[in-house]
Amino acid sequence: RASYVSGFRSVNLEALRPMGQAPCHGRRAPGLPDQPNLKRSSTLTGQNYQVRCAERLVKQSDEVPVKMVVFDFDETLTLTTFMSDDGNYAEDSYEVTTKINFESPWVDDRTEKLRELLADLRGCFQHKRTLAVLTRNDNKAGVQGVVNLLKVARLDSFFSVIWTMPWSPQLPNGAYRTGQEWKLFNPPMNRVKDDKVQVLKCVAASIGDWFPPAASHMQDFPQLMDLSIANIVLVDDDHQNFSSADGSKILRYCKVPRYDAQFHDFGMLPDIGGLGAHSDYDFEALRSFVDTPWDFQEEFKAKCYETTKSGGEDEQLPVKLVVFALDEVLTLATFMPEVEEFRTDASWEPTGDRVDKWRYFDLNQYNFESPWVQGRRLYKLRSMLRELRRPSQDERRILAVAAQRDGGAIEVLNLLKVGKLDQYFSAIWTFPASSVGPNGVYRADGAWQAFEPPSRQMNPHMTDLINNVLENTADWMPQLAGGGDENLADILPLKPENVVLVENEQIAERTHTVDGHVLPLRLCRVAQYDEPYRACGILHNMGGLGAHTDEDYATLVKFCAEPWQFPCKGAIEKVASEPDFGVVFEQAVQRVPTIRRMREQQRRREPDEGGSGSPLDAEDDMVACRRSQRTSCGAP
C-alpha cells in the first residue's frame, strides 16, 4: 500500500492550490498583503457542486439544434481517473475499477445514471445526436486506454468517436466505433492548435477527417450534415477550454465543477469533479440544456422569481425580510484579513488606513468593486440597500445576512463595516455552527452585539436556516424583545412568502429543507462566472449582485416591491443520498497493481461523446425515446 501511495501521488498534493486560491503571478497592486498568494476566503464548498450550462449565440431567435455533444473525460465523465499502466484490465477488476473512477461517495448508482443520460442525449430516430470524447488523458496506452476504461464501465457503446490531445506521433490520436468494434485512426490533430476550441472548429468544418464513417457514408449520419460550432455542446470541468486565446469561444457549454474532497479510501484529493457526482440535478440540467439550449442564455445578471403558484391566497403578501448571502452575492469574491481582532471583536472599527496587511481601499476593491461596470459598486449597493430597507415612510423591511462559512459572524460584520454596508442590516448569521467565534450578531440602537443563534439545532443549508428563522424568529433576532429603533415586532408573524432570499445561482435553486419540507420562497439568483480577476488570475464561481450590470439593483428593488409580477419558475429537485461504500483502496491495488491516478500536465481533458457511428440497438432506441418524452422542470 505504501508503494502504491507513492506511485499514486506522482504530483505533490500538498503543493496543489485549492480551487479559487489562484496565484497572483507576481502582479500585486501596491498595498496588497505581502504574501505569495491572495488567499480567497470562500464559502463552504458544498454550494459549488452543480453544473452550469450556457449558450453564447448572438441571435437568440435562432433555435439552432444540438447535433453533437462532446465530453471531457477526466473529472467530467470520471470523478478522478485511475488507470493501469498499459490501459488493460482483467475482468475480475471491472467492478472496483468502475467504482473508483465513476461511482460517487455522495450519490447512488452514478454509473447507471450516466448510461441513462448518454442514451437520452444520443436520441433516437430522426432526433439522433453524435456523442464524442475529447481528452488530454496522457495514459501510456493513449486513446486505446480511454476506450478500455469506458468499456469497463459499459459506457463506450454510447460514443461514436474519441479524440486525444495534444497530438502524439507515437500513438493514434483517435478511435471510432463501427458496430461493436473500435478502430484506431489518426485525425488531423497535428494540423490544429493545441486548443479545444480550435479542434472543435475544425471538427465542424471537416467532420469526415475527424470521423471517418461520415466521410464514406454521410447519408447514415444526417445529424452531422452542415455541422457548425453552434451545433456542438462541450461538457468540461475546465472553463479555459471554452475560450481560445484568439477570442474564439465554444458557443454552448456545460461547466462541471471541481473541488477538493475525501474520496473513498484515498484520503483528501484535490481537483476532483464528475458530472452528477453530488446531485442528480446535473443530469436533468444537461438534458434540458441539450434539448433547448436557447433557454440557457449566458446572461450575467440577477434573475428573480416566485416559487409559489399563482392564484394562491398568499400570492400578494408583502416582503418583510430580505436575506442576503455574503460570498459571491454582496462580494464578488471574498478576501478576509486574518488578524484576531478583526475576527473576534464586534466593536472593531476601521481606523487608520489598513487592517493586517490590507489597505482598506484594496480590501474594498477586491471584495466589492467590479472591474466590469462604470462607477463605484459600493455606492450603488448602499443606495439599493437603503431603498430596500425603507421603501416608503410608512413601510420598512428587515435586511439580514446569512453566510455559509466557518469563520463566525464577527468577521462578516467587520468586512461590511469596511465597505460601510453594516448600517443597513439588522442581523448577521453564519452556519454551520462555528467554534471560531459567535455565529450571530444583531444591531440594537445602533450598536452591534454578539449572540448565539440556534445554528447547532438545524441542518447546515440556507433553506433550513430560513425555515428555522420563520419558526423561531425571536431566537434569530434578539432585538425583537427590545425597544428603540430596532424594535422589529411589527414584522411578525413571518410566512415564507414574506421572505426574499438573495443567493448565488448554484444554491438558490433548492427550495426544500434537508427533511423534505418545501418552502414557497421568493428567490433572487445572482449569476456566477469564471473570470480573470485583478491580480488573482482566474477565479472560479465568482458572483456579485450588479457585478456586470446596474440592472440588478433595479430588478431586486422592483421584485421586493411586487414579487407577484415575476412569474413562478419550477425548480429541479436535487436531493443527494450518501451510500455506504466499503473499502475500495485495497481492492483497487489487489485487482490492478499498476493502477494510478491520471492528472493533466497542462490543461484539462475533454471526453468525446459518441453514439451515432452505427445504428442504435432497438432496445436503446426505445429507452431513449421514452425518456425524451419527459417534461422539463424549467431551465436551471
Image (tube, helix red, strand yellow):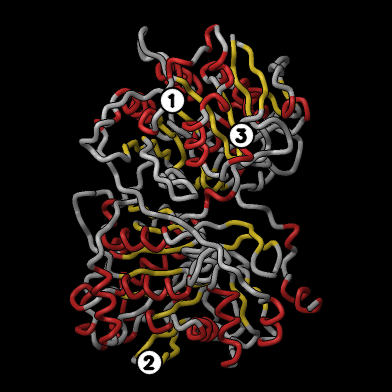
Q: Nearer the viewer, residue 422 or 511?
A: 511
Looking at the rendered structure, the secondary structure element under dot 1 is strand
For residue 38, side relative to residue 158 (left or right): right
Residue 399 picture location, percent across and down: 48, 23
Label whose residue precedes the other's in the sequence (3 or 1): 1
The circle drawn on residue 90 is none
Q: Nearer the viewer, residue 239 or 24?
A: 239
Image location (x, y in percent) of residue 23: 66, 47
Which residue is label 2 attached to?
180
Task: Determine whether 442 is above or below 173 in the image.
Answer: above
State the CA–CA distance, disc 3 to disc 2: 59 Å
Label 3, on which residue? 454
- Earlier in the chain: of badge 3 and badge 2, it is 2
Residue 506 vs 68, above or below: the answer is: above
Q: Distance between the residues labelled 1 and 2?
A: 60 Å
In this rendering, position of residue 190 left or right of residue 409? left
Q: Mark 3, residues whose alpha carbon is within 10 Å: few (<14), some, or many (≥20)?
A: some
State how far apart marks 3 and 1 are (Cα): 19 Å
Marks 3 and 1 in Cβ contact (< 8 Å): no
Quarter of the N terminus within the rendering: bottom right
* Comparing labels 3 and 2, the label whose residue is closer to the camera: 3
Side of 288 where 157 appears, left or right: right
**At x 33% / y 85%, what residue is drawn?**
212
Q: Name the residue under label 1.
A: 321
Residue 51's image quarter?
Answer: bottom left
